[in-house]
Amino acid sequence: MSKNTAYRVHVEDVNQTVVDNVNIENGAMLRTDSALYMGHNGENVVVYPQNYGATINLGWARYDDTFYTGTSDETKLLLSDGVEVTLPNNGGSIVRSHSSIDFYNSSTNKFIGENENDVYSVTVVFKKSAANANQTHIDFSLTGADDYDRINMALGFYKGNDETQNQHIMFQYYLDANALANGLTPKIQSDGGSAKIWDIIFFVQRTQNAGL
């Protein structure tokens, strides 16, 4: 003979935005289309499915800059010859594989992460042009922690003077303790002449969760 449980728990059906912003109460349960959550010690913990947290933590986020749009010369970032600057991205438009994911801080212009020894793959794209294409190139690098400046590259102009060229950069890294604490800043510098860039996009994917 089967027996009913002594208590029936009411579970509220909500969307993920409610889960991320609700006042958490111990024992209170919320259900989305993807997971079942329960309030526990100040957090909404996924109780079903058990591998859901690991899955969403291996997601991705895309950050589009909406300031340097290239609609006119005034909306392009001018790079002066020999002057290093932070590659900006205000994150004005963000698309995530899950609402809990954030791998870039648009306020500090730094790539960020979750755990020491996590692995991340990054794609950076933008449009660029140079008045003197034959003599000008752009240097790209990361700064903020020891040895990460080894992620660097020289980017040439191949289409001619003042011609728009698409730039696509890919790299990956693991986070050591210093990089986790301080973040990693993308830097850019024009050499041999001035240059302009715009339509900047960062795509960041977490490929290994060292916390599991």
Image (spheres, rainbow, N blue to C red):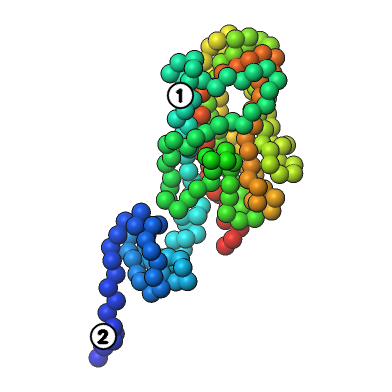
**Residue 46 visible to the viewer:** no
Where in the figure is residue 132, as x and y percent of width and height? 63, 9
Q: Secondary structure at mark 1?
A: loop
**Mark 1 crowdedness (10 Å alpha carbons): few <14, some 14-19, many ≥20:** some
Where in the figure is residue 176, as x and y percent of width and height? 69, 51
Q: Report, in whole angstroms, how far the alpha carbon at label 1 lies from the one at label 2.
A: 61 Å
Determine which residue is flagged by label 1.
69
Quadrant assignment for the C terminus? bottom right
Q: Could you tell me which residue is drawn at 66 percent across and 24 percent down? A: 189
Which of the labelled discs sits on residue 136, or is there none?
A: none
Where in the figure is residue 159, as x and y percent of width and height? 56, 12
What residue type is disc 1 on?
Thr
Q: Could you tell me which residue is drawn at 53 percent across and 40 percent down? A: 107
Foreground residue among 170 and 103: 103
Determine which residue is flagged by label 2.
4
Q: Could you tell me which residue is drawn at 65 percent across and 47 percent down? A: 182
In the picture provided, is 125 more to the left or to the right than 8?
Answer: right
What residue type is disc 2 on?
Asn
Q: Earlier in the sequence, mark 1 or mark 2?
A: 2
Mark whose residue sits in front, 1 or 2: 1
Where in the figure is residue 86, as x and y percent of width and height? 62, 31
Furthest residue in direction right, as rendered: 147
